[in-house]
Amino acid sequence: MYEFMAWLEGSAFADTLRGLGIWTYGLLNLGHILGIATLYGAVLVLDLRLLGLWSSIPARVLARPTVPLAAGGFVLAALSGVMMLSFNTTEYHGNPFIYAKFPIIVFGLLNVAVVQRLGAWRRMTGGESPEPGDPAVLRVCGGLSLLIWTAVVTCGRMIGYW
Ligand code: HEM
């Protein structure tokens, strides 16, 4: 792991970023925060709906804006995060929060892939009538997703305090 971190920190990509000026890291951090806010805000609204809140609003209607917003927010957070990480990668060596954050992100992406293949999700987003077990399945999906992304935000915030 340390070898990979040292390689990333010493790469031409990281050198170029560090050479861009004193505002670069701050602007990347701003991009990261905006990405996180967009991702987590969208996930929070959709997952609380799946958990049963605001039942008068069809989940399919909420999914339309929140799913692409979450995807866009994730891309922004991931791009800015990789650039921030390459600035001084070896500083994070041994930091348990960064080591926990990446597997949880992978788990979160796998969860998205699985949920989008579920019949309950496809019926909900397609506006079809639900089958008897669908609300329970969607509640579990919403709860799990909220837990995962809350854990990612928590790990991210704690990295700096280790
Ligand atoms: C996928 C690639 C990602 C990478 C490589 C990455 C990397 C980083 C790095 C290097 C930091 C700075 C840590 C520090 O020195 O304090 C950070 C901060 C943070 N990250 Fe990420 N991150 C990624 C994605 C995400 C995602 C998807 C989320 C949340 C949904 C997230 C949440 C956070 C939070 C809350 C902070 C603290 C920000 C602050 O207080 O300024 N990260 N991340």
Image (spheres, rainbow, N blue to C red):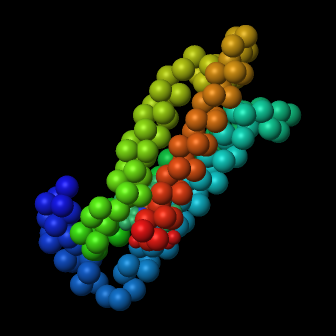
The answer to whether 77 is drawn above or below residue 108 in the figure is below
Name the residue: 86% across, 34% down.
Answer: 56
Which residue sits at x=70%, y=46%? Answer: 45
Quadrant (top left, top right, bottom left, bottom right) of the C terminus: bottom left
Q: Give the vertical position of 49 relative to 128 (above or below).
A: below
Q: Which residue corresponds to the image point at 43% horizontal and 80% vertical from the top-left?
A: 26
Write down the quadrant of residue 159 in the picture: bottom left
146 sits left or right of 86 in the view: right
Percent across and percent down for residue 160 are 44, 71
Residue in view at x 58 percent, y 57 percent: 38
Of the pair 116 and 99, the residue shown nearer to us: 99
Quarter of the displayed picture in which ligand 1 can be seen: bottom left
On the rendered structure, is 88 left or right of 51? left
Residue 94 seen in the figure: yes
- Total marks in image: 0
Q: Position of residue 77 (x, y in %)?
A: 45, 59
Extreme-right residue of the structure: 56
Q: Position of residue 54 (x, y in %)?
A: 82, 39
Quadrant in which residue 125 is drawn = top right
- Quadrant for the N terminus in the image: bottom left
Q: Which residue of the protein is positioned furthest toward the bottom in this rendering?
A: 22
> Height in image: 136 above or below 84?
above
64 versus 91 height, above or below: above
Is residue 78 visible in the rendered structure shown here? Answer: no
| Residue 104 in the image, given as x and y percentages of width and height | 43, 45
